Image (spheres, rainbow, N blue to C red):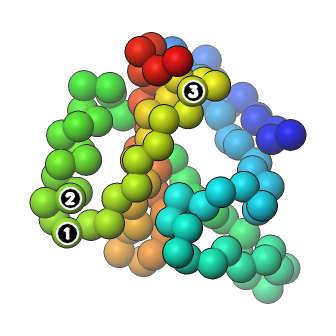
Amino acid sequence: MTPFLKVAEGYGGHTQIIGLFHESLPAPFPKDPREPVRLEQTSLHHFALEIERGDFDAELNRLQALGVEVTTFEHGWCRWRSLYARDPEGNILELVCYDASIR
């Protein structure tokens, strides 16, 4: 079970949350092995920022045009559409939007 901590009511159907995911869940970039959580280093897997649904395709195309490796995923259980990319320091960034068409 994944715990979600509600931060705020949110916007456009997307509640502002902090999700605590178990490290055994699938990784956005499967070829990168996930290190076990250790006290000596961060256990941050990724952070997510909400974008408008209308901006999703433009952001996907922009990042791909820049040569950024991007993974996309549809989260049917909550109707979220996500794209995952790495920032210049190697952190995984998720751009996520609510999409009512996802079932």
Please indicate whether residue 51 sits to the left or right of residue 46 in the image.
left
- Extreme residue in the left direction: 65
**Quarter of the image where one finds residue 50:** top left
| Residue 48 pos. (x, y %) | 51, 47
Q: Mark 2 = which residue? A: 64
> Disc 2 vs disc 3: Cβ atoms closer than 8 Å?
no
| Residue 96 pos. (x, y %) | 44, 38
> Disc 3 vs disc 1: Cβ atoms closer than 8 Å?
no
Q: Is residue 49 visible?
A: no
Secondary structure, mark 1, is loop
> Disc 2 vs disc 1: Cβ atoms closer than 8 Å?
yes
Please indicate whether residue 32 sits to the left or right of residue 85 in the image.
right
Q: Identify residue type, mark 3.
A: Gly
| Residue 42 pos. (x, y %) | 70, 74
Assess disc 1: are there few (<14), some (14-19) or many (≥20) residues with their C-alpha within 10 Å of its C-alpha.
few
Residue at x-position 42% and y-position 77%: 89
Query: Label 3 vs label 1: CA separation?
Result: 28 Å
Vertical placement of residue 46 versus 50, above or below? below
Query: Label 2 vs label 3: CA separation?
Result: 24 Å
Vertical placement of residue 39 versus 58, above or below? below
Assess disc 2: are there few (<14), some (14-19) or many (≥20) residues with their C-alpha within 10 Å of its C-alpha.
few
Q: Identify residue type, mark 2.
A: Gln
Q: Earlier in the sequence, mark 2 or mark 3?
A: 2
Q: Mark 3 = which residue? A: 76
Give the foreground label among 3 and 1: 3
Q: Is residue 26 visible?
A: yes
Q: Identify residue type, mark 1.
A: Gly
Residue at x-position 55% and y-position 76%: 32
Query: Label 2 vs label 1: CA separation?
Result: 5 Å
Q: Mark 1 = which residue? A: 67
Secondary structure, mark 3, is loop
